[in-house]
Image: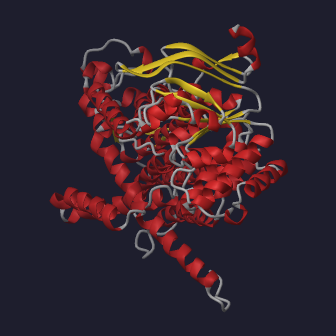
Amino acid sequence: MIGHFLFRGLDRGVVVALTVILAIGVLVPAANLLLPPGHPLHVPTYLVTLFGKYATYATLALALDLVWGYCGILSLGHGAFFALGGYAMGMYLMRQIGSRGVYGNPLLPDFMVFLNWKELPWYWLGFDRFGFAALMVVLVPGLLAFVFGWFAFRSRVTGVYLSIITQALTYALLLAFFRNDMGFGGNNGLTDFKDIVGFPVQAAGTRAALFFLSCLLVAASLLLAAGIVKSKFGKVLIAIRDAESRTRFIGYRVATYKTVVFTVSGVLAGLAGALYVPQVGIINPSEFAPANSIEAVIWVAVGGRGTLTGAIVGAVAVNWGKTWFTGALPEFWLFALGGLFVVVTLFLPKGIVGTIAEIRAKRTAAAAAAPKPAPAE
Amino acid sequence: MTEPLAHRALLYLDDVRVSFDGFKALKGLSLTIEPGEMRAIIGPNGAGKTTMMDVVTGKTRPDSGEVLFDGGGVDLTRLDEAAIAGLGIGRKFQKPTVFESHTVEDNLYLALKADRGPFASLFHRLGADEAARIDEILATVKLADRRDDLAANLSHGQKQWLEIGMLLAQEPKLLLVDEPVAGMTDAETMETAALLRRIHDSGKSVVVVEHDMAFVRELGVKVTVLHEGGVLSEGSIDHVASDPRVIEVYLGR
C-alpha cells in the first residue's frame, strides 16, 4: 500500500530530480573530503555548509508548495514551523555542550546561568537525549500546524485573511521568543554548539554528513509530496483550491483535508529547520521574522507554484542569488528580491519549472498534430 | 396529519423560516418531495429558491421549521454539507462549478461514491468497477470523447452536463439542480431536459429550479411556484400558468 503510494508519484520529472539531488548529496561531500584542497574539483567546507543550508531551504519551499501550490493555502508564516524545528534541535545541541560552556555549569546552558536561574525549566528536560529531541522536532511544529489548522480551517478562514493570521502567528512567536524569561535564550537565541550525536559540529566530516542528510530530506520530502499530489487525496486538494464549496457539496470535509496537508507541511518545515541549525550554528528569534516566510513564498513563485520540483529550483536559485548579491552589492539585495517577485508575477506567472513544462507540452502537442512522424520528445 | 406525510416523503420541509439581517428570505416554506418524484420549482428573483436549496444542503441553517429527509428519519438542520452529501443529496449550482484543472474523467472520479475520508483517499486506487461507472456516466452526459480534456476547456453547456454527471457519480437519492439551462442554446436546453428525464426515469428524485418556462414545460412535471419566501401555487404547468396569482406575480409588475 505504502509502496504503491510512493511509486505513483514517480513521474519523469520527479525521478530526474531525485537522481540529481541524491547525486549532489553524495558527490559534494566526496569532493570535499576525498580530494586534496589544491585539486580543481575540491569543494571547500564553507561551500558544503552553504549548499546544506540551501537544501534545508529547498525542503521548506517544498512544504510551502504542497499547501500553497496544491491546496491554495497561502501561508505567510511557514518560517514559524521551520524555526520551531530549529529550536528543538538547538535545545538538544545546547544540552550537549554540558560543562564546556563559558560558565562551566554541567546542567544549565550559559544564558540561564547569566540570568541567575537555579534549575532547568521543565520544558528543557529530556532534550539531552537525541531521540527525544528528534521526536520534538516532528511533534512541536506538527502539533502547532494541526491546532492552528484545526481552528482556522474549521472556521472557514480562507484567502488573504488566512495569510494574515499566519503572519500574525509567526510574529507572535517572534515576540515571545525574544523574551528572556521564555527560557530560549532571548534575543541571542541558542548558539556555541559543540557536538551532535558525539561528533564535533565544526568538523568537515560532520558538515559533510549534515549536507548529505539535508539532501536526503529534500529527496524524501519530494517523494512524499509527489505521492500525495498524485493520489486521490492530492486530486481533492486541487479540487479544494479550484472550487472549495463544490468539493464540500460533493461530500468531502474540506477542513479535514486542509488540516492534514497543513500538518504534513508543518512537519516537513520543522525537519528542515532541525537540519538548518547545526549547519549555520545558531537559532535565534529572527528566524520567526515574517519577512523570512514571505521570502520562502517568493522562492516557490520563482521556481513555479504547484510543481514541487520548482520549489526546490526556486529556493536554490534565489538563495544563490542572495549569496552573490549580499557579497557583491549588499545594499541592493532587497530591491533585487522585490524586483524579482514583480518580474516573475508579470512575465513568468508559472515560474521557471512551470514555464518549461508549458513550452514542452506545447511542443508535444504540436508534434502530435504534425502529420509526419516527429522525433520523440 | 403531518406525521404520515413526513414518513412518506423523501424530502419534507415544514414552516421553514430564514432571515438575513432582517430580510426574510423564507417565510414559512412547506414543501414535500416524494421518492422518485421530479419537481420543477419556479419563481421570480428573490422568491427564495436558492435559499431553499441552501437550507436543504446544509449551507444555511433555518431560524425555525423542520427539514427532514428519507421518510422523516434524518433532521438535515443538524448536519453539515459533507454529511448531507454523504446521505445522498447532490446539488448542482447555478453557475457551473467543475474542477477546471482536472480532466473530465478526474472530475467524475472525485465525485464517485466512495469513502470521503482523507486516509482512504490517500491510498485509494481506481478500481475496474469505478472505471466502468465513469464510462457509463460519460456516455450518459455525452462527454465520452472529452474524457482526457481539462474541464476548463469545455463549453458552457458541457460544463453543466459534466456537473450533472458528477451528481450522478455520487449516486444520490435526490438531485437539486439550480438553473441547469441558464446560458444554453435551445438545442442544449432540450438535450438537458431529456437528460434530466432519463435521470428521473432511473428512479432518482430530482428538484429543478428554473426560470425558463419553455424548459419547465418540456420537463412536463408538477410545478411549485415560490413567491416571497413561500409557496404561491402548485400543480401542473397549465394549472399554475392559469393561476391568477401567478400571472399577477410574473406579469403584474
Query: Which residue occupies 60% across, 50% down?
Result: A229
The quadrant of the picture occupied by the N terminus of chain A is: top right
Furthest residue to the bottom? A372
The quadrant of the picture occupied by the C terminus of chain A is: bottom right
Query: Which residue occupies 75% across, 52% down?
Result: B137
Observer-nearest of A182 and A364? A364
Furthest residue to the left? A331
Residue A231 in sight in this render: no
Observer-nearest of A195 and B48? B48
Q: Is residue B128 above or below residue A262?
A: below
Observer-nearest of A198 and A337? A337
| Res. B22 image quadrant | top left
Residue A354 in sight in this render: yes
Q: Is residue A77 above or below residue B14?
A: below
Query: Which residue occupies 62% across, 58% down?
Result: B188
User: In this image, B244 relative to A106: left or right?
Assistant: right
| Res. B7 image quadrant | top right
Q: Position of residue A190 (x, y in %)?
A: 33, 33
Q: Position of residue A32 (x, y in %)?
A: 47, 63
User: In this image, A100 relative to B240: left or right?
Assistant: left
